Image (cartoon, rainbow, N blue to C red):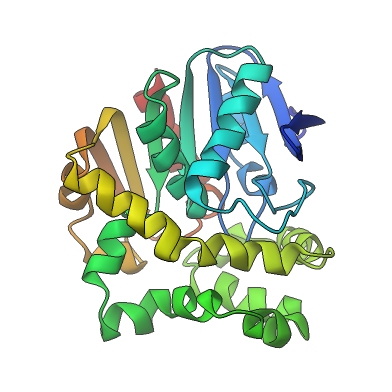
Amino acid sequence: MSRLESSMAQVGDLRMHYQCGGDGPPIFLLHGWPQTSHCWHRVAGPLAETHTLIAPDLRGYGRTDKPRGGYDKRTMAADLAQLAEQLGFDRVAVVGHDRGGRVGHRWALDRPDQVERLAVLDIAPTREMWRRMDSVIAKEGYWHWFFHLQPDLPELLAGSNIAAYLGYFFERWTFQRQGLAAEDVDEYVRAFSAPGALRAGFDDCRAAFPDDADLDDADYAAGKRLTQPVLALWGLAGLLGKFPTLDIWRDYADNVTGAGLENCGHFLPEEQPEEVVAHLRKFLG
């Protein structure tokens, strides 16, 4: 991330941290859980050669404020829409990994005038994951969604050993484990050890049901789809490697391309940065 400079912005009542740099058309890079904007450190340099990168810490994450509310994806997307306007960008491309992809999906649905392209990394639409949820999917990849929905208990149990709790996911969800170096894991543990950080991350998950689910169902019933070009990338060693991921996204978007990455788990930008950059350069132009 040496090519990016750290800055703060006042976005409504939220103080938002973001990293920015490069030259060219703007790309917003949206991290997931349990990470921060640091997750783009292996792809930022090459992408910054041809694009202006904006990598924010989402509401509740990293150095951004951690309010008690506003974790529904519509509000989180509106945070980013306002940041883009403050920075003077009328049209942006969005790349989102994990929960950042879910925020990006909502941003693109709500503001097609602002989001011109969307790349989603290792996710299927949230509505589709709820619809397909069964004991196998819950056991192999999404049990934590249900755990994190519970009030207070995740903070109590994970808070006693944050490094061990996050480390479980970094170990279980990776194929190229050398991609997540010890110093990178330490950075994420440091971020989630800050006051309010664990709670905010869990609140992001808690907003998925019923707030986000109700809105997603309403949009689907109304036939509201993504009209922008969409790129879907996923790790073939992860759970999405067992799904017809492109076919799923084509039920939610008009123009979808994508690929599964060999020898890759969940953390695509750190496990297979060269492949991610190659796909993004082709997609973004």
Relative to 285, is 19 on the left or the right? right
Figure quadrant of residue 110: top left
Residue 60 visible? The answer is yes
Q: Quick check: 19 above or below 144?
A: above
| Front-most of residues 22 and 15 | 15
| Front-most of residues 13 and 59 | 13
- Name which residue lies at 45% across and 40% down: 104
Residue 182 visible? The answer is no
- Name which residue lies at 38% across and 26% down: 117
| Front-most of residues 33 and 275 | 33
- Exactly how many numbered labels are in the figure? 0
Figure quadrant of residue 202: bottom right
- Name which residue lies at 77% across and 33% down: 2
Quarter holding the N terminus? top right
Relative to 99, is 188 on the left or the right? right
Relative to 10, is 85 on the left or the right? left
- x and y percent of residue 147 in the render? 51, 81
Relative to 271, is 49 on the left or the right? right
- Name which residue lies at 46% across and 73% down: 145
- x and y percent of residue 215 in the render? 35, 50
- x and y percent of residue 3 in the render? 74, 27
- x and y percent of residue 45 in the render? 64, 30
Q: Quick check: 79 above or below 262?
A: above
Q: Residue furthest right?
A: 195
Q: Quick check: 170 above or below 40?
A: below
